[in-house]
Amino acid sequence: MKYSYKSINELGKVITGKTPRTENSEYFNGLYPFITPTDIHSFNEKYLSTTERTLSDLGALQLKGNLLPKDSICFVCIGSTIGKMCKTKCDSFTNQQINSIIPYDDYNSDYLFYYMRYIKDYFISIGGGTGSGKGIINKTVFSKTKVKIVNDFDFQNKIAIILSKYDELIDINNKRIKLLEQAAEIYFRKSYESKIKNKNTSTIRLKEILSFTRGLSYSSEEIDCDEGITLVNLKNIQAYGGFRRDGNKLYNGEYKERQLVQQGDLIMGVTDMTQDRRTVGSVALVPFINGKSVISADLIKIISNINKSFLYCLFRYGNVSKYISQFANGANVLHLKPETVLKIKIQMPNEHFISSFIKIINPLLEEIELLNQKNEILVNQRDLLLPRLMSGKLEVK
């Protein structure tokens, strides 16, 4: 197989995104996805289901020079998220933290997407390394980076088909997960709000039903390791609730038994690296993780005799997390004092309601967990194939 060295801008047109003037609300809330690094939740996504913000026709007109057609490749080039990627499903725009490639006709867009994923570690290294939070790869550096690539379009197409099959299955599972999460939210809101409306709840402070354990602080040396136990950290908290499986780190330092977590434990973020309050106050149920797991100081483990599935839904869907997040403060990084959580007042239904509720909700959460486990297997299989296919070590017929 013949390889040649090409710069990124020889593979496609490179565009750096731009943000419209945010004070003009007429530029937003339209049909055009506006992609930012926080919309790309993991290093494993291909297409985004939604974006937090969209642009209107007026906003699109202002940024018409930055328009990305369908099947463009978006590559995050700043901070600890360098290397996160997605493809566009339709005409879209990005902010200035993303460099995008509009592939030329000589290159299969799916192949280029997977190739960029294959070499993302190189960009992470020149951008300062994973988790540094300080790196940046500007348009010039990105565009002029030389890569070793196969020019044979048939070869590209074969690799794209093989790897795309995995992402298609992952996408199907993600759609099912989203539907199940929506069903859980709708059921909770309807049943819980009816209890409040009919005055079948009592007002209590959270300290009456729960306590918490703080996570551990760690040094960079303690997570710079190839072996250790799993460190569940802030990156494991999805924006506004839920567990992210690609956020795990390895940890080889000391810990206390009370800082261990296991499947079914409820954790909460008490820090937010932005001012958007996406993770602070947000909760997640710990999934199955092989081996021991501990939580970092950015999280607390919630301890309660109340069913954790109910508490998870109460915090995530009952607006408790959103309310709690308002008590976090900080100039650059938001911090929430865990003791503040205990003072919050909520409307608490009786035990009969909780018991009936979990009989309905647990099968939904179990199905979500099963689908996430299937996706984890698919991601691992795809990522094992990726370097072997790209390097030519695995023959493609």
Image (cartoon, rainbow, N blue to C red):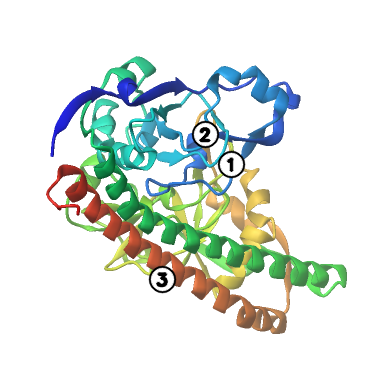
Residue where numbered disc 2 is placed = 36
Residue 168 placement, left or right of 189: left
In the rendered view, tell whether residue 80 sits above or below residue 223: above
For disc 1, the neighbor class at 10 Å (few under 14, some 14 to 19, many from 20) is some
State the SS at label 3. Answer: loop
Q: Residue at x 56, y 38 (%)?
A: 90
Q: Badge 2 local density, few (<14 within 10 Å), some, or many (20+)?
A: many
Q: Earlier in the sequence, mark 2 or mark 3?
A: 2
What residue sits 13% from the left and 34% below the top? 2
Which secondary structure, mark 1? Answer: loop
- Of all residues shown, which one is farthest toward the top? 140
Question: Considering depth in this image, is 339 or 393 the residue closer to the camera?
Answer: 393
Residue type, label 2: Thr
- Corner quadrant of residue 191: bottom right
* Residue under the point 35% across and 65% down: 260
Percent from the top left, x then y, of residue 354?
A: 67, 78
Q: Look at mark 3 in the image and give the residue it sits on.
A: 263
Percent coordinates x, y for residue 248 in the rendering: 34, 53
The residue identified by callout 1 is 51
Residue occupying the point 40% across, 39% down = 85
Q: Amino acid at mark 3?
A: Gln
Q: CA distance from mark 2 to mark 3?
A: 31 Å
Side (left or right) of 390 relative to 173? left
Q: What quarter of the picture does the N terminus occupy?
A: top left
Precedes in sequence: disc 1 or disc 2: 2
First in residue order: circle 3 vs circle 1 = 1
In the image, 358: left or right of 366? right
Say what amino acid the circle numbered 1 marks: Thr
State yes or no: discs 1 and 2 in contact (Cβ < 8 Å): yes
Give the vertical position of 91 relative to 343 (above or below).
above
Q: CA distance from mark 3 to mark 1?
A: 30 Å
Please tell me in which quadrant of the rendered image residue 352 appears.
Answer: bottom right
